Amino acid sequence: MRYVEYGKTGKTVSVVGFGGLRFDLSKSNEENAKLVTYAYDKGINYFDTAPGYCDGRSEEILGVAFRQLKKEGKTDFYVSTKGRPTVCDTVEKTVASVKKSLETLGVDKIDFYHVWCIRKMEHYNLAMKPGGQYEGLLKCKEEGLIDHIVFSSHQPGDEVLQVLDDNKFEGVTMGINLLNFPYRWKGVEYAYNKNYGVVAMNPLNGGAIPQHKDSLSFLAKENETAIDAALRFNIGSPQITISLIGFGSFSDIDHACNIADENEVYSDEDIENIKNKLGEHMNATCSGCGYCKVCPQDINTPAYMLLYNEKQMFKKSDEQMIDEIYGLECWNYSMNSQGKAADCIECGQCESECTQHLPIIDRLKEIANWEEKGVNNVTV
């Protein structure tokens, strides 16, 4: 495992971090916790979670693992969790949230506590208001409950710069991967050059990279897959301190750790070559985060946006999308949607929540057209 300094914190962290968002909920907490302890034994020392991850079980699973590690005298790991400014909007609520996470995780201190999911500047401003979340986190820091205050961002690079320039945080977590990194790379480089810790989440773009690994093979080097290329990019970019990976198996952990062990570091020229390969059409893809699932018409917006990736990423024609509209892939995307794309009332709630700032309403209109023509094709 390769280790680097996390910004100016003085903490040495593994370049691969354990992301606590992908646990198999059909398994017990104890069984899932074995993945965590195995990752620790492989050299991973940064573990990230949040209240609400995995139906609220992620912190519980990590708590099982941490208690086991501590029982064995293993305490040299770092814990990261989060709180939303929209939920922790007072000092009292913030302190209570931190204490609840401490109890669930079974630790005495949270090393990295995130102001969670800043998608636009008003979220940041809410966190920073007098008597709000940030003030509560400072209180927790004074009491020794947390070590470092950081934030997670789903903003464009320019807005990330605005937050960083206020000098209130010591690190940032962003969705960065081989497909969408140009969208945020300006913020990544700025944070790196200012000696902030930079944590990259979602390295496989919400599963889009494994799903389309053959189509994305142009990004890979000889004798590697697109999945390898994606992990190597995140793990090998010196601008990225930690690459968070949601592991589903022991072999997934081995795979990521082996890449870290190879210690391949990407140069600026390597990164520029990848940008050129991608082209601009790859920058506006849906990562599948699910935050846009707020539709009053009960449209499964995340599913539809993942479907739209077929056009956005691979430049499929409207005719191809219409031909596929009742295929298995489309059915898997839309089967859980009570509302259809044509039911969109253009209220804008989904676009307000979108972490990629995508034109969801316009895309739903396109999809509605595909669905209408698909129905006509079937009934003729």
Image (cartoon, grey):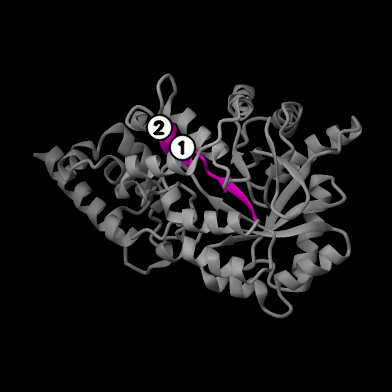
| Mark 1 burial class by Cα count in 10 Å: few <14, some 14-19, many 20+ | some
Q: Nearer the viewer, residue 3 or 96?
A: 3
| Residue 307 in sight here | no
Left/right placement of residue 365 relative to residue 47 reads left
Which span of residues is magenta-colored?
A: 196-211
Image quadrant containing the C terminus: top left
| Residue drawn at x 71%, y 30% as measured from the top left | 39
Q: Is residue 110 above or below residue 2?
A: below
Asked if residue 136 is positioned above or below residue 335 in the image, the reply reads below
Check the image and report above or below for 356 versus 136. Answer: above
Q: Which residue is mark 1?
A: 207
Residue 347: where, in percent of width, then height?
37, 69
As rendered, which of 17 and 55 lies closer to the eye? 17
Query: Residue at coordinates 27% horizontally, 60% vertically from top-left?
Result: 362
Q: In the drawing, does residue 148 fall left or right of residue 353?
A: right
Q: Which amino acid is tagged 2? A: Gln
The answer to whether the residue labelled 1 contacts the one labelled 2, judged by CB atoms less than 8 Å apart, is yes
Residue that label 2 marks: 211
Q: Is residue 219 magenta?
A: no
Q: Determine the residue located farthest toward the bottom in the rendered image.
A: 130
Q: Position of residue 197 (x, y in %)?
A: 65, 52
Image coordinates for residue 53, horizontal then vertical, percent: 63, 47
